[in-house]
Image (spheres, grey):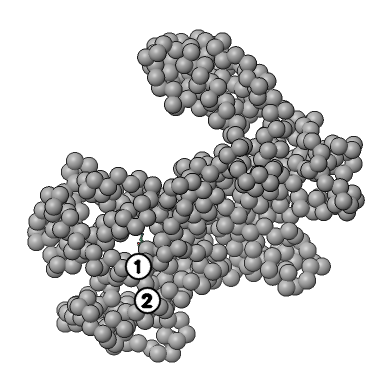
Amino acid sequence: MSADPASVPLLSDVLADWLRAAFRRALPPAADDYASIGVVSTTNPEFGDYQCNAAMALAKALKQPPRQLAQAVLDQAGPHPAVERTALAGPGFINITVRADAIIDLAQAQGRDAALGVPPVGRGQTVVLDYSSPNVAKPMHIGHIRSTIIGGALDRLHRALGYRVVADNHIGDWGTQFGILIRGYRQFVDEAALREQPVEELERLYVKSYEQSQADPAWLDACRQELVKLQSGDPENLRLWEQFVQWSMAEFERVYRRLGVSFDLVRGESHYNVKLPGVLATLEQHGLVKESEGAQVVFLEEEKLPVCIVRKRDGGFNYATTDLATVASRVEEFHPAKIVYVTDERQQLHFRQLFAICRRLGITTALDHVWFGLMRLPEGTFSTRQGNVIRLERLLDEAEQRALAIVQAASPTMDPATQRDVARAVGIGAVKYADLSQNPQTQITFSWDKALALDGNSGPYLQYAYARIASVQDKYAERYPGQDPGAFPLQLTEPIERVLALKVTQFPEAILRAAELYRPSVVADYLYDVAQTYSSFYQNVPFLKAPDGVRESRVRLCGLVARVLRTGLDLLGIETPDRI
Ligand code: ARG
C-alpha cells in the first residue's frame, strides 16, 4: 500500500479545477469570484455524476443570462481525460458524466492507499478539541454525553485528515458549588451510600445543601465560608475537594472506557486558577474592562452582545474568565490553527462573548463553537427530575442487552462469549450512531426501535452490511483458495456497479466535508448511502456465478466497500464485528 495518500486526487477537485479554468477564459477579467466555483455530486444519475451551479450566481453578478454563460464555459472547457460528456441543464446547470475508466483508476488507486484516499490536509496543523467536559460532583447530563460522542467522532475525523489533535477534557472542577457541597458533606453524608455510588451521593448532598441555603441565611453563610476556606488553600477543604474530583473522574473514566473515548489532556478549570488575575490585568491593559455595579465587565456593544462579567462583585472570577485564561494558555502551549468547543446549544452566548473578547485581545487563532440540541429521551426511562440527566451506564447496559437478543437471533450457533462481545459492539454502536447520524442542530428523540433497526439508517444496519460483505469475501476465498481478486482489474459492466464504484471514490470527500462542517452526520449519511447501493448491487448482479475476471472484479469492489464501511464507522467510533 502506498504511504503517500496525497497521490490519490479527488474527482471533485479535478473537475472543479477544470471548470474554474474554463470560467476564467469565458469571463471578463473583472469577474474574479472563481474560488467559489465547485462541483457537487448529484443525487440523480439523470443529471450526470457531478454538477456545477456557479454559472447562475456569476451570471447574476454580471447581469448575463445564466444559460448563455454556462454554454460559454462549456465551449471554453475543451475535453478532459476524466470526462465522458457534459450537458447544459435547466437555468444554467453544468452536468458532468465521468468516464468509467477514470472511476476505475481512482478506485484502484484508493485501494492501494492505506488511507483510502483521505488526503492529509491537516498535516502540520494542530487542533485543540475541547469536548465532554462534565462537572465534578454531578452526573453527566445528556449534553455531556452528546459532547463526548460527537467530540470523539470529530477527534477521529481530524486525526484521519492528518491534524495533530489535542483532545482536552475541560472538567468543571471549580466554582461556588464546592462551598455548598462541602457544607452538605460535613452535615449529611451517608458513608455507605458514598462507598456504593459516590457521585450519586455527592449529587444528593449538593441538592440538599443547596435547598437549605435557599431557606436559611445562616446555612448560606456557612457554605460561603467553606468556599473561602477552599479558595485560600485550607488543607482540610482541599483534601475533600480532591476526593470529590477523584470520585467523579473514576465514574467519568468508566463511561469513557465503554465509549472508547480518550483524551490527551484532562485539565480542569482549577488548572487555570493561578492565571485569572493575569487575565484581568491583560483586559485592563487593552482598556477592555469597566466597572459596573461593583463588578468588572467587558462591554460588547459593537458585537451586539450583552456585557460579559469577568470579575464578580464579591471578587470571584467566573466561567468566562477561566475560558479566557484557557484560550491564552492553549495558544501559547500548542500554537493551534484552531480551537474547537463541543457543547450543547445553551452555551452559544457564552462562546460568542468569549470569542469576541479574544478578537479584541488580538488573538487570531480560529475559534469555533460546535453546538447541538439536547436529545429527547423516551419518557420515563432514564430521566430524573431534571429531565436531561440520564444514567448513561444504564442506557448502555440496556443497549447491550437488547443487542444481545438480536445477535442471538441472527447467530444462534455462535458461542456465548462471542455473542456477548458482538452485542457490546452492536449496542454501543447503536447508541453512538443514533446520535451521530442526526443533524446535531435539530431536536431529536432517541428511540430504541430506530437505533436498533436492522433495516433502516442505524448502526446495526451498517455493521450488518459490513459483516455480510465480509462473508462474501470468505466464500470467495473458500472456493478459489490462493486467488487474489486484487490482481484482476476492476470492470464496471453493470450500471449499478458503476454507481457503487463512484460512491466508493467519494469517501475522502465525505470525510473532508464532515470535518469542515463539524458534522459527523455527513459520514453517517454517506455510509448509509453506500450500504444501500451495495445492497442493490448484491441483489441484482451475480457474484460467485459471474464469469472469470468479472467475478474477481466484483469481489474486489466488495472489498473496497467493506473497507469504506469499516474505516468510516471506525472514524465515527463504531466497531465492525466480522459476524453478527
Ligand atoms: N463544564 C461545562 C458545562 O458542563 C462545559 C465546558 C465546555 N468547555 C469550555 N471550555 N467552556 O457546562
Please tell me in which quarter of the rendered image ligand 1 is found.
Answer: bottom left
- Quick check: can you spot residue 555? yes
Q: Secondary structure at mark 2?
A: helix
Q: Residues within 10 Å of mark 1 (few under 14, many from 20)?
A: many
- Give the answer, above or below, for where 578 lies relative to 224: above
Q: Which residue does the numbered mark 2 point to in the structure image?
A: 245
Which image quadrant: the C terminus? bottom right
Q: Residue at x 81, y 44 (%)?
A: 485
Quarter of the image for residue 494 reads top right
Give the residue at x 45% y 63%: 264
Q: Amino acid at mark 2?
A: Val
Check disc 1 and report the residue beneath it: 268
**Quadrant of residue 328 within the rendered picture:** bottom left
Which quadrant would residue 47 be assigned to in this image? top right
Tag 2–tag 1 contact (CB < 8 Å): yes
Mark before the other along the chain sequence, 2 or 1: 2
Can residue 457 be seen here? The reply is: no
**Could you tell me the amino acid type at mark 1?**
Gly
From the viewer's side, name the closer residue of 536 and 22.
22
- Residue extending farthest front: 3
Whole-percent x, y for residue 567 in the image? 63, 51
For residue 364, side relative to residue 438 (left or right): left
Distance between the alpha carbons at the discs numbered 2 and 1 = 10 Å
